[in-house]
Amino acid sequence: MKQYIFYFLGMIIFLGTSCDQVVKVDLPPHEEQLVIHSYMNPGDSMLSVIVSHTRGALDESEEKLIDNATVELFKDGAGKKTFSFVQALDGDSWGWGGFNEFRGALYQVPNEEAFWDLSSTYELRASADGFASVSSEQELFEPIELISSEYNPEGGISPDGYERLDEILIEFQDKSGEENHYEFRVIFESEYDDENYVWIETQDARVEPTMQTAVSKDNTYDGQTVTLQLMTYPYWDEVKKLIVEVSAINQDKYAFNKSFFNYYMAEDNPFAEPVTLFTNIENGRGIFSVENSRRFVVWEE
Amino acid sequence: MKSISLKWLSVSLFLFFASGLLGQKFTISGYIEDGETGEKLIGANIFHPESGQGASSNAFGFYSLTLPAEDSLSISVSYVGYETKYYKFPLKSDLQMDFKLGTFELGTVEVIGKKVESIEENTQMSTMTIPVKTLKKIPALFGETDIIKALQLLPGVQSGGEGTSGLYVRGGSPDQNLILLDGVPVYNANHLFGFFSVFNPDAINSVSLTKGGFPARYGGRLSSVLDINMKEGNMNEFHGEGAIGLISSKLTLEGPINKGKTSFLVSGRRTYIDLLARPVIKYAQRENDDEAIPGYYFYDVNAKINHKFNDKHRLYFSNYLGKDKFYVRIKDNFDDSSYETEGGIDWGNITSALRWNYLWNNKLFSNVTATYSQYRFDVGFSETETSDGETESFSARYFSGITDVGGKIDFDYIPNPNHHIRFGTGVTSHTFDPGAIEFKEESLGIDSIFGENRTFGTEFALYVEDDMRIGKRLKANAGVHASGFSVDGKFYNSIQPRLGLRYLFPSKLAVKASYATMAQYIHLLTNEGIGLPTDLWVPATGKVEPQTSWQAAIGVAKTFKENYEISVEAYYKEMFNLVSYKEGESFFGISESWENKVEQGQGDSYGLEVFVQKKKGKFTGWVGYTLSWSNRTFENINSGNPYPFKYDRRHDISLVGSYEFNDRVSLSGTWVYGTGNAITIDQFRYHVYEPWGGEVDFPRGVEVPGEKNDYRMPNYHRLDLGVEFKKKKRLYERTWAFGVYNGYSRRNAFYMDSRTVNGEREFFTVSLFPILPYFSWKFKF
């Protein structure tokens, strides 16, 4: 429904023989910062960190490949894993009003499950010539234990009331006495693709849809057995298996997911207030997240 | 000896009674009216120059003035936009006199002079009154005269953006304006997304805007009171007026139902862009299988009846109904099936007021009002599919709104010229519908509503104020407004002291000062961009507290050469518990309560306003200048640092002029200049890599805004010109009005964005209106 308003505003602008005018803006000089993206899971075979950098808003120079960075992961300030540059990630991406080239550097190190425990603190540090060193600290949270799940094809109605969606109900026990955050993903395994991550909707006030995920925090169901509702758009390919991935995440990842989704929603609206993406990287940008994920098959052919 | 004593006794008794007679006072009371139409004049002044005593007519034109007995009493009666007159008559008993400005003839009363009223006489500061006649002359977008746009030309009042009707008064937001139409709050004063206001000037009698120094009788909003009174309808003769313009036409009829006793007024207007465009759209689509018809219109109707039972009782019943609708209808025809889709948005207000005046005696006047106000917004979508003779339909709509039902009683007690005491009480029941979705599908028998719960709130108010004279030079308006709000088992209350002072120096320079605290129990959730009808009215709740403020102002006022008024005011205002959407939140989405989408913070504003006005002569007009600052602070916005309000405008200038060459031709023009609106622009950017599928997918480019509202759009300026040619015909008077909006086609920025062109990054502004000519044909009989 939102589109009607913007179509109409567009019509007014058009009828008003609107015109645009380039404006010279003097921006303060920007000091480039390291950008870190790392989503670690104790179950991963490799731990990955993508290193890139920020640029000024009007800077159209080519993005630099940072392949000489020092990237390390510390456990409780001591036990250390050193990452190695593996490959450049480059191509065209969508953003800031058009396609543009990206050039990230992928660093990896083999993972061992024994490296991870619930009582430790994990600090990621990165440095590279010409940039200030960056760091971020995270803890690992206990994964959830699923009690039951239910899949109801066309069992839900989309929040805007336009169409029927497939409903998935997830029942689990929340741990009491602490603030817990969860992230949900719905994955279809099909005959043609191995895995497809789909958009999640919900009518459940305790669940907040984000970018191809949904998040929830337990402030309304602390310590309770809870059933949360997820909804997905019917997948077109022949589905063989429907999987829900539930991750115990921390406050930072929850805030990052929400701000990224808010950014996406406000992107094409010139009247929306700008959204600043959450970051937990000190002296830089991006996100470092330690997640404890479990996958559950909720339906199988 | 005995005879001498008797003589002395006789002389003493004579002197005693004579002195008693000399000290005797009598009261003149009644109504001040327009002599031609019988319309009551609100805020008209009656003044006794000898004693310096005076009084003003209230919202129903009633006045009361008690003066010493005199064989030949001289008084003046004046009103903005009318010529002031002096009258002379004996005052030897209480008199009930209705003054009719303009055509006054009252037997033994002699009209002895003319004078314009002076700004320095009033205690009230920060109040602007513009005669509707003046408003109608101001050139306007598409020729649609607009009361709110005219008010934007006053110092301390700003518009939101190009062509829009939002009012931003002394750094406040639009929800902080109490807009009253015949005493009833109007919640959305905009047509066409704010490009026009809902007030049809042909139906309006008076407009006054109070920006500060609020008298105790007003409450419920932080920043301003816009008090609009509808015409009552001509008591003496049947009259009409209307106009045919570029985008709309309007017609107003008024006259007596029972001459001198009962009158009516009906006024309506409608736009016709949709009707004009429809044949063109149909022709363009004549060879298509499908047909899509978009359209937009608005209309509004004002209607009022007033009846005078006798000198003591009067009854007024006034109504307003207005609606905007934007729609798209699509028909797809296939061999064996067809689809009909209709979607659109509509919104509108309904207000109604029943008012009963009762004159208890020549010093006590009361008015009882019953009010109803409703604002409703609807976004709807429906689809009907017909296939193989079977029909399936589906519809969904999102709606929100607010409904008020209220009652109040107000008293005016004027015991003597040194006191005008007002007191009263009122209660309003609010029903809030903060957003719900209705979903229907016939084939499956679904008909359900889900979303935010309806909320009920009850607001109470009680006030007393005294407009008093303390000695020859000092006047004061002191009072207190007490209010309370009950919602969801929670009760808020507030005691709000109000004070206004005026000291008149011998040089006739008036120094004024005021202080007022205010409380507001309802909030408007808006995106700070443009005023959309989707903006939600919500109550203070247990979680979201009421807004409060205090404001202090000081100023000087003086009249020069009887024709030029100058006032300079400085103000400081602090606002608390303001509401803002959290970053990225909006009204869409019902999975989360609106209370979780907002946060509360505070704001301050301060500035200086200069207003120079020429009210009389062939050339009339004013110059207004505002120097101001307005800031906001929210814990989770801009890292908790204070930032400029979006409509923080350092300099705001307006020049308004009208020149009457003769009775037939007049020229008018306005020029406005304002510092560009504050905006946030992106400072740097990077790519976000998402962890989809455990592999790196395409990253997304994001931009990081700098400090909030740290940058300014280009400054705004615009010249509008209009000319009117009047001609009296045998049966009616016609006026041709021509003009241009944005006379030198300035590309004023409506919004600003960034983009990449040929590999170069640039910021650009989008403007709405280049030079736009207009014309309209008006008639009056």
Image (cartoon, grey):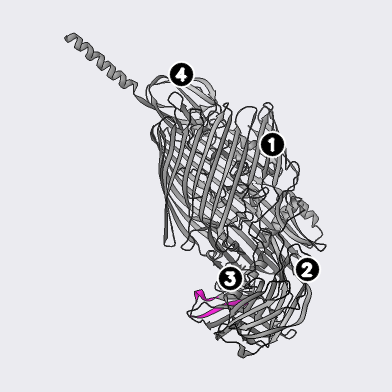
Q: Residues within 10 Å of mark 2 (few under 14, many from 20)?
A: some
Q: Residue at x 46, y 57 (%)?
A: B457
Badges 2 and 3, same chain = no
Q: Which residues are magenta?
A: A217-231
**Separation of disc 2 and disc 3 at Cα?**
44 Å
Q: Are marks 4 and 1 in contact (CB under 8 Å)?
A: no
Q: Quadrant of residue B145?
A: top right
Residue assigned mark 3? B446
- Badge 4 marks a residue whose secondary structure is loop
Locate the C terminus of chain B and report the quarter of the image it occupies.
top right
Residue B222 x %, y %? 51, 50
User: Do the residues marked 2 and 4 share a common chain?
Assistant: no
Indicate the chain on which mark 4 is placed: B
Who comes first in sequence, dot 4 or dot 1?
Answer: 4
Q: Are the numbered discs 2 and 1 placed on the same chain, yes or no?
A: no
User: Which dot, 2 or 1, sits closer to the camera?
Assistant: 2
Q: Amino acid at mark 4?
A: Thr
Say which residue label 1 marks: B669
Q: Residues within 10 Å of mark 1 (few under 14, many from 20)?
A: many
**Viewer-proximal residue among B564 and B538:** B564
